[in-house]
Image (cartoon, rainbow, N blue to C red):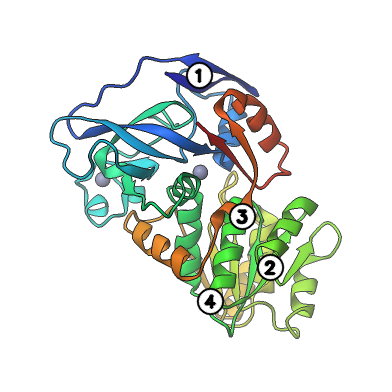
Amino acid sequence: MRGLVFTGVGQMEVRQFPDPIPGVGQVVVDIRCTSLCGSDLHNLHNPNLNHNLIMGHEGAGVVSAVGPGVTKVKVGDRVALYHVVSCGKCKFCMAGYAQFCTQDRRALAGIEHGTDADKVLVKEDNCLPLPDDISYAVGAFIGCFAGTSFSAMKKLAPNGLNTVAVFGLGPVGLAGVQYAHAMGARVIGIDCIPERLTLAEELGADETINFREQPTVPTLKALTNGNGPDRVYESSGSMQAQKDAIDACAVQGKICMVGFNGPMSLKTDNAPSLYAMIGKELTLMGSSIMPRQYHYEIVDFLRAKNIDLERMITHRFPFEQIEEAMRLFDTGKTGKVVIDM
Ligand SMILES: [Zn+2]
Ligand SMILES: [Zn+2]
């Protein structure tokens, strides 16, 4: 089978690998769709990466082989892939929170071979059942960023009385825009890339702020009668955005930080921001990936609110053009880039 590996900083190639053979509790999924994620770009520019590992962690497809003891899926099932492979036994795994596994936490394209390939080998627990009316692309999204985004927005739980500021309009932010809009809130998107701002407006942002052209905090205040947004969703991971989120948030507002982009910096050089957090009685939350069982809730929510996550796809490529797709995605000027097998 074919698989994409990163061979050096900014370098990649498609190589041949032996087809995987499922062991006890394992299944092989024939990939139908794999999508590119910001963390792929972190890997592409990481000098210490394992150059023999197949990349990709957002995938969906059809089960093509099952190992001994597999009972939850069968050959022919459509599945999305939950990208964290965990022990299944520790207290967090038992509760569905594989992202906090304390015993054996792996990730597709981190330790295990990933989804930028014809086939992937996973535990049966990594298979999220994919109903016929949910596309492979949306399934791939749910297993990573669209699930991460849902888990973060669910913590903020905005409604029609709230204004949600979404910092960072990459895929996690854009899914956040769609969810917050569907939950009834007024949505303000913040980024500096015009293509992303335009896409956010198409997907449900009521206003957008280009922070290279307008100062973020004063503009957010001006748009909210001087109060600031009462819900803030920070997906960029930038220190400036984290500080702006706290400075802009309304009194007794809620902030959820889901962006992870380099060293987290709230411990240093932030006395004014944390002072603002205390003085305004803000609730500050972090959010990491999603508990696996949210898969069902997300599918129900997408159906009930008629949300089409494929609307954030700006480019689709066949697997033969995955290198070209990755280079385009690396410009930061696309929405979601999807590879169809
Ligand atoms: Zn991802
Ligand atoms: Zn565990």
Quadrant into which the N terminus falls: top left
State how far apart marks 4 and 1 are (Cα).
43 Å
- Which of labels 4 and 2 is toward the front? 2
- Which of the labelled discs sits on residue 247, or is there none? none
Using residue 21 as the reference point, say whether residue 320 is left or right of it: right
Counting residues from the N terminus, which is met first, the one under dot 1 or under dot 2? Answer: 1
At x 58%, y 23%, the residue is 320
Amino acid beneath label 2: Ala
| Ligand 1 neighbours mark 3 (CB distance < 8 Å) | no
**Helix, strand, or loop for circle 2?**
loop
Report x, y in % for residue 111: 39, 29
Which circle's residue, 2 or 3, is located before the other in the chain? 2
**Mark 1 within 8 Å of ligand 1, using the beta carbon:** no
Q: Quadrant of residue 60?
A: top left
For marks 4 and 2, the one nearer the N-term is 4
In the displayed structure, would residue 136 be above or below residue 17?
A: below
Q: Residue at x 35, y 37 (%)?
A: 62
Q: CA distance from mark 3 to mark 1?
A: 33 Å
Q: Amino acid at mark 4?
A: Pro
Residue 41 x, y percent position in the rendering:
61, 35
Q: Which residue is mark 4?
A: 158
Secondary structure under badge 3?
helix
